[in-house]
Structures are given as C-alpha cells and as structure tokens.
Image: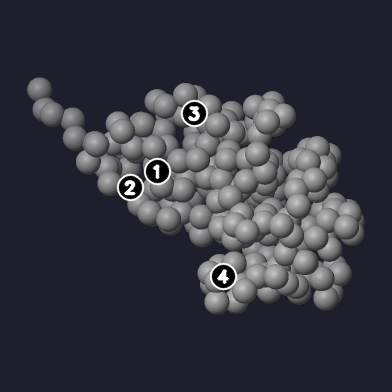
Amino acid sequence: MEECIFTEREQVIHQLFLKAYLVKSPGLLYGKMGLGIALFDYGRYTGCSLYSDLGDELTDGILDDVECKTGFDFATGLSGIAWGIEYLVQKGYVECDTNLVCGEIDKRMEKVCVHRLKDLSLETGLEGILHYVLIRLKGSLMQNGNIPFSSDFLDDVQSAVTDVEEDKSSDSLKKMIDVFRGFICSGKRVDYTPDIRSFIIEKPSLENMEKVSLSLRKGLAGWLYAYE
C-alpha cells in the first residue's frame, strides 16, 4: 500500500477544519473572526465554496460571543470584531446594516478615552482604534451617508493623533493618522482600503503543525495568504 503524502497546503487545511470549532475567542487577530475572514478570502481565491461555508459558520452570530467584559483592543476585543464585520460586508461576503450590527460596539468604544492612550500599537493601542474608526466611517458613509460616531468622540480621536510624536510612531500608524486627518478635512471622504494581509506578522513554521496556532496574526489562518 502506497504511503499517502499530503502537501503543506493540504495539511494546513486539514488542521483548520479539524480545530476551527475549538477556537473560543471571537477576536480578529487571534480568534474566530480572523480565521473566518481568512477562510472567506481563501474560498474566493480558490473558487471552492467549502472554505467560505466554514468561514460563514465561524463568523455567523459572532457577536453572541462578545461579553460585557470584552476589551476594546484590536487584537482580541471590540474594535477588531467590528473591523471584521465591516470587512466581510465591504468585500461582499455577507449582507447586513453594519450600523445596526455594530451599533452597540460603537457605543462602548465611545466610552474609551482615546486621547489618554499611551499605547500606540496595532494590537492594543491607537493604531488599532484608527483602523476600526476608519473602516466604520467608510462603511457607514457607503451605506447611508451618515457618520456613526459623535462629534465628541471624533474630537477625542483627533486630539489623540495630534499628540502623537512623529519620531515615536511607526510608518503604519503614520499612514492611519494621515487617512484620519484627510477625513477630518473633507468630512465625507475616507481614503481607507482594508488590507487583512497587513495584520499578518509572520508565516509560522509547519514542522510541528499540531502545535501551531490557528490565528490570523501568527498562525495557520495567516499562512493561507501565502498562496495569493
């Protein structure tokens, strides 16, 4: 009997299908939202609906997994989850009114004192919040021409970006700040294109695949984008 040898891609897909339902966190960079998005994108890339179907199952009703204690951070919390919902709608994977679906998240995010944030990072700081704010602004303006945030909240964000010292900010943060300032100047234009690949920081080694995370940020979900 011949030994069955699987390609790396086949091994990755097997692990994702085997363990996807074991992922508990609803978050974007390390949880179900990121994994679901990767499967949607991979399904479109390959033309195989099997991947998209699994992505749909993982992200359907994902807000039910959000608890009152869920934080605001982009990696595991509210801002990343809302970003993921907008991404799915703007890419045409699902249809919904994101102002209704993300409305409760927006209310909770407006309670964050953004101007007091010392953390500038994507995962837990200002850069992640800017990604959330920009994709929500773009989505809402596309759907009904309205701005989903209060003027006080936007003033708070503007104060935060004004206080950022240029020599302490990354190139990616500077880009987000420029886009936000562009919106403030125009009031109706958001020059923001969501790019899920920009959140992937490393392609994991597959030597001990059973131990590799399924996450978008550092794991097998992010690995899928190597084929694009």
Foreground tag (2 vs 4): 4
Residue behind mark 1: 219
141 displayed left or right of 51: right
SS at mark 3 in the image: loop
Of marks 4 and 1, the one in the foreground: 4
Outermost residue toward the left? Answer: 1
Q: Which mark is residue 23?
A: 3
**Could you tell me which secondary element the residue under label 1 belongs to?**
loop
Check if mark 1's residue and mark 2's residue have beta carbons within 8 Å. Answer: yes
178 to 141, vertically: above or below:
below
Q: Is residue 222 above or below residue 165?
A: above
Q: Which residue is under mark 2?
A: 204
Residue type at mark 4: give it.
Ser
Q: Amino acid at mark 1?
A: Gly
Dot 2 or dot 4, earlier in sequence = 4
Mark 4 highlights which residue? 169
